[in-house]
Image (cartoon, helix red, strand yellow):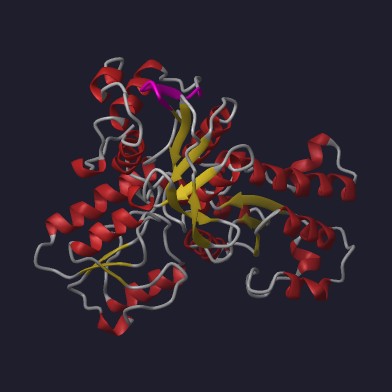
Amino acid sequence: MKTFNIPDFYRSRIITPIKEFRRKNDKLKRDYSPTLLDFGPVQFLIARHFGFCYGVENAIDIAYKAIAENPNKRIFLLSEMIHNPDVNRDLMERGVQFIMDTKGNQLIGWEQLTTEDIVIVPAFGTTVENQQKLSELGVNAYVYDTTCPFVEKVWNRAAQIGEKDYTIVVHGKPNHEETRATFSHSKENAPTVVVENMKQAQILAEYMTGLRPALQFFEDFKNQYSEGFDPEKDLQRIGVVNQTTMLASDTQGIADYLKNAMIRHYSLRPEQVEDRFANTRDTLCYATNDNQDATYALLTHEADLVVVAGGYNSSNTSHLVELCEQKFPTYFIESVNKILDRQLIRHFDLHKKEETVTENYIPDKAPVRIMLTCGASCPDAVVEGILVRLLSFFEGTKPIEEVMRAF
């Protein structure tokens, strides 16, 4: 696999060697068990897979290359390159400006761009409409295009099945940059509808099978379907693709549900299923799967609390938090600065969509066991900062150098 030039300040003297050690000793990625760091009064269980994925490393490599190669030019990002505040803050401090926010709202007018400007496409990709706008302005955004290869794989698969007269069902968050980009590319080749969750998939199945009146579709899926969509005609043959950062199990569950609805409605024999339902299993992102599988394996162990690091608007990180909080007290933090002291932690509540402060989050016992993981856009250095900060709250711990000798 290709290697990337990642700035050293994103790496970690603790986390990076552990990940490399695990990689060398498990090249086929069959061992999802976590790594135990035993400091005596506190132990850390670190997930087998987490942090920068291939797509994120690719994006960072290209973005910093663009800065290095264009010292005297204005550099813009269409929107946040990845959903990590530390990375985006560093890019801004180096002079990079964002044209849009994460919801697609314009921050800098198109008319302010010139043909001399450098425009970087974020890792989520961008819409066909934005590509056309840049082309009209004479800006070549493909020179520094950081679109994740696995996102492009979804686009290509959607195009392939669209050409075979399947309608595309995109499992994703309708307002997420990646879903907006995937929807935009998909609708160029086929009727397209976005479903956010299983509840919407169940509603869609009722339109597929005629249990709901077709006209109601346009209200139930408002702003989630392509122009000219005809629910009576366009839901007879479908294929499911996803926003790559969604829970793979959720996407598969939705695909299986819609497939079974097709089988029952049309009384399909096994060899007839693909007449109505395209096989798209190969579009699920390997990194998202690895991180989620590693989290499931992490949660088979016991712990007193879990700390999940990452941007609050990071979809893949949010899904890891959802998994962890089902079993343990879980604290979702952007950075080490959210750990106020041994008694107080400021963290993001996914359900209220706001930060909150929790007291006495570290139990008064010994040893305390803490699970650590993070999203695909979170640097190893951030996880190290969190580990070192938590470690400082305990007396009589083994030196980091001693614990790290095994790696």
- Seen as rendered, the residue at the extreme bottom is 111
**Camera-nearest residue between 374 and 74:** 374
In the image: residue 72, left or right of residue 87: left
Q: Is residue 43 above or below residue 4?
A: above
- Residue 4, above or below 402: below
Is residue 374 in view?
yes
Which residue shows up at 43% across the image and 56% down it?
124
Q: Is residue 153 visible?
A: no
Q: Quadrant of residue 75?
A: bottom left
What x and y, as percent, mark residue 206? 84, 60
Question: In the drawing, does residue 209 fall left or right of residue 240?
Answer: right
Q: Is residue 144 magenta?
A: no
How many marks the image carries: the answer is 0
Residue for point 32% across, 24% down:
397
Q: Which contiguous range is marked in magenta?
A: 32-43
Q: Is residue 38 magenta?
A: yes
The residue lying at 26 percent from left, 16 percent from top is 405
Quarter of the image for residue 28 reads: top left
Give the camera-side residue of 50 and 302: 302
Q: Residue at x 49, y 20 (%)?
A: 31
Residue 386: x and y in percent read: 35, 41
Quarter of the image with the N terminus is top left
Q: Quadrant of the C terminus?
A: top left
Q: Residue furthest left?
A: 72
Left/right of residue 6 with respect to residue 198 in the rendered view: left
Rendered location of residue 254, percent (x, y)? 71, 48
Q: x, y percentage for residue 337?
A: 33, 52
For residue 378, above or below residue 348: above
Is 398 in front, or is 15? 398
